[in-house]
Amino acid sequence: MSDATFFKNIGEYADADKYDLINNENWYCKYGYVPTTMYYVSLYGAGKTTMEFGCADGEYSLMYYEHAKPIKAYALSLFAEEIESAKQKLAMRGLSDALVEFICHDCSIPRQITEDGVDFTYSIWMLNNATNLTMLRNMCENLYINTKKGGKCLILLATADNLMGQLIDQKLHVRITDIRAVKDIDPATGREEVVGLVVDKSLMCDNPDAEGETFFLRDCFYSDNRVKATMESVGFTNFHQVPTLPLPTTEFGCPIEKAKFADQTHYKYFLADKM
Ligand SMILES: C[S@@+](CC[C@H](N)C(=O)[O-])C[C@H]1O[C@@H](n2cnc3c(N)ncnc32)[C@H](O)[C@@H]1O
């Protein structure tokens, strides 16, 4: 597929009204991770089997399915309500679970979903819910056991080195209530270091639909070294960072004046192989 076709197709999906609006901005598109995920799902999942970990209410899973056309997509998430909503969306699009199967499961508990695994596993904004290193390892192991031999795995991480960038955002009224260091032997230095940070924060959101509500979020940030070591300890090889798309923001339904604020330093994408 040419770049022009890719951007045209994706532009049709990434309609600013359709996705999460925070402070009247299309946050998902602004920071470019929907297009980037879609790019990699298409590259490695088209005509193959895929499995998404932490799929929420399936909005994005269905978008990825419709764009990449895997022969079968699985999508897992923690809460029964999310999966119920995802299944309703599936039915409304006239699709069946023979094509996209939504499964309620705690992905920090390793469980083999299919006998041989799938060609492409991916997890976007879920590993940041691992509040300790055991949970992080279990999530990585889950990705590993569900990836077919010869398959690939894509993860998105909010890493510790860009933590402050995440938090300094006055418009969202972020209040930090607690930050705890996760210490362990840093695989890069061999010394005990801070390898991760757990941040509890309450977020007063300007989204008009959520007026007056306070959300309590927990985000965990691990260093690239720690995540690399964890992914390798469960068996993945060739763990490396891959680029986010150089995003022409306006193509994705975001107002042009927002485009100049788009930056892609808040998160990183990594790819790994299962040999
Ligand atoms: C921020 S949402 C990301 C949704 C989607 N992947 C995306 O790209 O927008 C994080 C999702 O991960 C799910 N999640 C968090 N911890 C999980 C766990 N242990 N097992 C399964 N899902 C989990 C949450 O329920 C939530 O739906």
Image (cartoon, helix red, strand yellow):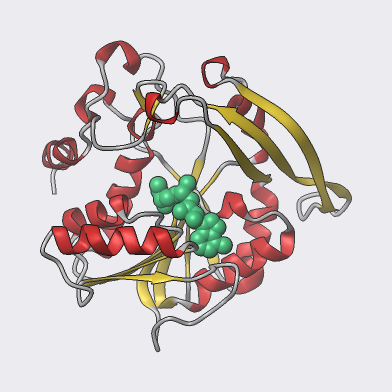
Q: Residue at x 44, y 24 (%)?
A: 263
The image position of residue 225, as x and y in percent, is 68, 50
Front residue (pair 118, 212): 212
Corner quadrant of residue 181: top right
Corner quadrant of residue 234: bottom right
On the question of residue 238 being in view, the answer is no
Image height of 18 relative to 212, above or below: below
Q: Residue at x 17, y 39 (%)?
A: 3
Seen from this angle, which residue lies furthest right?
192
On the question of residue 101 being in view, the answer is yes
Image height of 148 relative to 44, above or below: below
Describe residue 17's horizontal placement relative to residue 138 as left or right.
Answer: left
The image position of residue 44, as x and y in percent, is 30, 62
Describe residue 126's horizontal placement relative to residue 21 as left or right.
Answer: right
Describe residue 77's horizontal placement relative to residue 128 as left or right.
Answer: left
Q: Residue at x 14, y 66 (%)?
A: 95
Image height of 151 relative to 252, above or below: below
Front residue (pair 269, 163): 163
Image height of 261 relative to 242, above or below: above
Q: Residue at x 49, y 48 (%)?
A: 125
